[in-house]
Image (tube, rainbow, N blue to C red):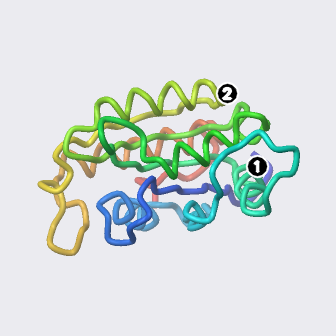
Amino acid sequence: MEKDKINILAISGSLRNSSSNSSIIRQIKTMMPENVNYKIYDGLGNIPPFDDADAIPAPVTGWRNEIEAADAVLFCSPEYAFGVPGTLKNALDWSVGSVAFSFKPVALITASSGGEKAHAALQLILTALGTKLADSLLIPFVRTKLNDRGELSDTVTMLAVQSLVTKLILAITGNNFPLPDEQ
């Protein structure tokens, strides 16, 4: 890889800042090597409902630009009503007609009480968008794996998240980049 740094865009499927998924996204930032620019996307709630209008709203253009500028995208999403949270699904729907996600390495974490249905649905959606799924992780009963500050405290889960981060970085760079455990 010729660049000194890689850019990873992190997206929480929950709009709530105190959600388990938002907490995990923030904690993952501490796992990144120094030469990773890790940006947490915070505009999901600003994206208007999807329609097939010719004019693309500014928040959608911003969403697509953020994705295109990233070398990879990391999602961490809950499951709502046995499916993908509406705001995340809406944003992804706006991406279908673009090439923003085409061949983009992505990693997916679904952290919820159960999460199996949203996890499967998100994997299908990411396939439809043309992404390269580097890794995915289902964290069921997520609240039992967090401490009172909302941080992952379960060792097995923490190791699985670190492995996912490593696989995402490798999907971007190959083997010529310092990985999280090499810091």
At label 2, the amino acid type is: Gly
- The Cα–Cα distance between marks 1 and 2, rounded to whole angstroms, is 13 Å
Quadrant (top left/top right/bottom left/bottom right) for the N terminus:
top right
Q: Position of residue 155 (x, y in %)?
A: 18, 52
Mark 1, other Cα within 10 Å: few <14 / some 14–19 / many ≥20: some
Q: Residue at x 16, y 46 (%)?
A: 141
Q: Residue at x 57, y 60 (%)?
A: 44
Q: Residue at x 63, y 36 (%)?
A: 174
> Camera-side residue: 183 or 162?
162
What label sits on residue 93 in the rendered view?
none
> Camera-side residue: 31 or 97?
97
What label sits on residue 130 in the rendered view?
2
Mark 2, other Cα within 10 Å: few <14 / some 14–19 / many ≥20: some
What label sits on residue 68 in the rendered view?
1
Q: Is residue 62 left or right of residue 106?
A: right
Q: Position of residue 125 (x, y in %)?
A: 55, 30
Q: Is residue 99 above or below residue 141?
A: above
Which one is earlier in the sequence, the residue at label 1 or at label 2? 1
Q: Is residue 114 above or below residue 86?
A: above
**Callout 1: SS:** helix
Residues tagged 1 and 2 counted as in contact (Cβ below 8 A) = no
Q: Is residue 52 left or right of residue 78?
A: right
Q: Is residue 101 above or below residue 18?
A: above
Q: Position of residue 121 (x, y in %)?
A: 44, 29
Q: Position of residue 138 (x, y in %)?
A: 30, 37
